Amino acid sequence: MAISTMKVGAKMGNSFRTDISCSKDFIIDQPKAMGGEGLGPNPMEVFLSSLPACICAITRIVSAQKRFQLNGVTVDVEGDVDKDFLMGKTKEGRAGFTEIRAFVNIDADLSDAEKEEVLKEVTARCPIADNILNATVVKESLK
């Protein structure tokens, strides 16, 4: 087993703007209607967008390993969230997505059955899908 540690950092000042430091720095924010500056996606969008990006990347890896021509992949993802719980209006429910649906189109010269097999392998190998489907230990501490 080859374990490696990935690191990202976040810094927030006196607004919702959060500067993320990683291999390609970016900004996470809230829309102006929610008190942010609208400078970037909100945290839920960032989380949700990581799934289709990962599905696309893993599909590209699988196509290279299985040696089939991948012309492209499109993935649309939608997730349901209980905003009342998120905003503290209720204590029943949960803050995270209650369901996430991914709609994948694999553009390759494969039968539908072959595409289904590729998608099953992609889902099994996608680290983002794995983290959504399985419990991951989260340890927080003050520094």
Image (cartoon, grey):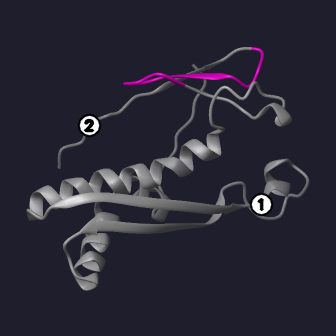
Q: Residue furthest right?
A: 89
Where are the magenta residues, as a range? Answer: 14-26
Task: Depth check: give the residue in front, 47 or 56.
Answer: 56
Q: Is residue 139 above or below residue 37?
A: below
Say how many tags the image has.
Answer: 2
Which x, y percent locates residue 16?
Answer: 74, 25
Picture residue at 84% right of the left edge, 47% below the top: 87
Which x, y percent locates residue 141?
Answer: 58, 29
Q: Residues within 10 Å of mark 1 (few under 14, many from 20)?
A: some
* Residue with the mark numbered 2: 4
Q: Residues within 10 Å of mark 2 (few under 14, many from 20)?
A: few
Which x, y percent locates residue 70?
Answer: 21, 60
Which x, y percent locates residue 86?
Answer: 79, 50
Q: Is residue 72 left or right of 79 when viewed as pictured? A: left
Element type at marker 2?
A: loop
Element type at marker 1?
A: loop
Picture residue at 71% right of the left edge, 14% below the top: 13
Give, as a three-letter code, the residue at label 1. Asp
Q: Residue furthest top?
A: 13
Residue 8: in sight, yes or no?
yes
Disc 2 from disc 1: Cα separation: 34 Å
Name the disc covering residue 82, or none. 1
- In front: label 2 or label 1: 1
Picture residue at 36% right of the left edge, 57% below the top: 55
Q: Is residue 42 left or right of 122 when viewed as pictured? A: right
Q: Residue furthest bottom?
A: 113
- Displayed quadrant of residue 109: bottom left
Q: Is residue 82 above or below residue 23?
A: below
Query: Which comes before the other along the chain, label 2 or label 1?
Result: 2
Task: Depth check: give the residue in front, 60 or 48.
Answer: 60
